[in-house]
Amino acid sequence: MSSKNVVFKKISKDKSVGVYIGKRDFIDHVDSVDPLDGVILVDPEALQGRKVFVTLSCIFRYGRDDMDVIGIAFRRELYLSTRQVYPPLQDLEKGIHTKSQAKLLRKLGNNAYPFFFEFPDNLPCSVALQPAPHDVGKQCAVEFEIKAFSAESQDAKVRKRSTVKLMIRKVQYAPESEGLAPSVETTRDFLMSDKPLHVKATLDKEIYYHGEVIKVHVSVTNNSSKTVKNIIVSVDQVSTVVLYSNDSYVKSVAIEEHGDSVSAGATLHKVYTLLPLLANNRERRGIALDGKLKHEDTNLASSSIIKEGVLKEVLGIMVSYKVMVKLIVGGLVTTVCVCVCVCVCVCVCVSLFQNIKPEWVQTNIIRFEPEMQAVVTIT
């Protein structure tokens, strides 16, 4: 990203209130979250004696706006915090928390006032389920919003012309940690075959950055009388809407299939490479994203982290990843799936996070959890 100072601003239609902030992405470092600070610019003449308030809200949106017509709540506020900005309730100097606020106040003049919010630890991160290209309306999402408005009181009716809203994102970050390379293996016996089929899947390391190739080492020892006709390796994204319905969506975000076969009595050792990117999944409905700000690009959603003492239902939408190795066995319609799991079947389960480097270089990572289990499924 550019090292230049960037300021985001938005002004209400009647010009009475304006919001100025230095960034729109706020990082959840697991043990702490970047605070939100900014400046509100007011026009005392346009206010005509009204007060100015600013709110920070976390909203879970499930379905389309028109669902409200049939009695289904399509929107729920998970968090709401309100501050009175004008007239100020404290000395100006006490309201300044950062250097960027101080610079903005000097530039905007005497009618500018600072505001400051801290994110509670139990709030989810921004997530949105990608709509199809021709879908209309707002998508299922967890969103964060700053709203500034003028009114006679905090609970009075708010006029749209005197209101300004600005979307922001809370994104997950996880520091790189050393861990064992995930590995899982399983053995499958077949009817009319004296010896089994053995499959093992191993990764190079526990954490991967987005844009970095994921290498999956697959070893197949086929002592059975069956023939492995094909091997399919994929990275699957699992999105679960936990607040209302517990609906789950499983989408392959990267897949490799080369028609590899392993005849009876033979072995195979091969490294498959996978690269999960949003660029290859842009028009697929239901892919979870790290939120999406208007006119700005985003990426595949970070994996959800359930902090101690926080109910998973509060997260709204939970996201996890798994690497799956699937063997198609001939003779019968049989599928042997091998997964290294963090959360699911015979697969290596993955976690996507933000990794913030110096100078605000933002990179996603994929984490393969060390705790795994092997599962065999037959269809």
Image: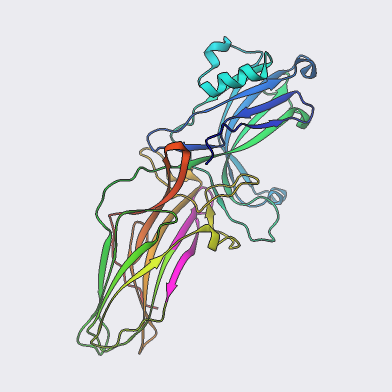
Q: Which residue lies furthest to the front in this view?
A: 3
Q: Foreground: 371 or 283? A: 283
Q: Where is residue 74 in the image (x, y as percent from the top left)?
A: 64, 47
* Front one among 269 and 65: 269
User: At x 40% / y 45%, what residue is drawn?
Assistant: 305
Q: Position of residue 20 (x, y in %)?
A: 63, 28
Q: In this view, does 143 lie above or below 13?
A: below
In the displayed structure, does residue 267 sit left or right of residue 124? Answer: left
Q: Magenta residues: mostly which secondary structure?
A: strand
Residue 266 picture location, percent across and down = 24, 85
Please report the residue visible at 61 percent of the width from the left and 28 percent of the height from the top: 55
- Is residue 153 visible from the viewing direction of this image? no
Question: What residue span does the magenta drawing correspond to?
Answer: 236-257
121 on left or right of 203: right
Residue at 69%, 61% in the rendered image: 134
Q: What percent of the width, then of the height, locates residue 311?
A: 42, 42
Q: Is residue 208 above or below residue 15?
A: below
Q: In this picture, is 159 found above or below 322?
A: above
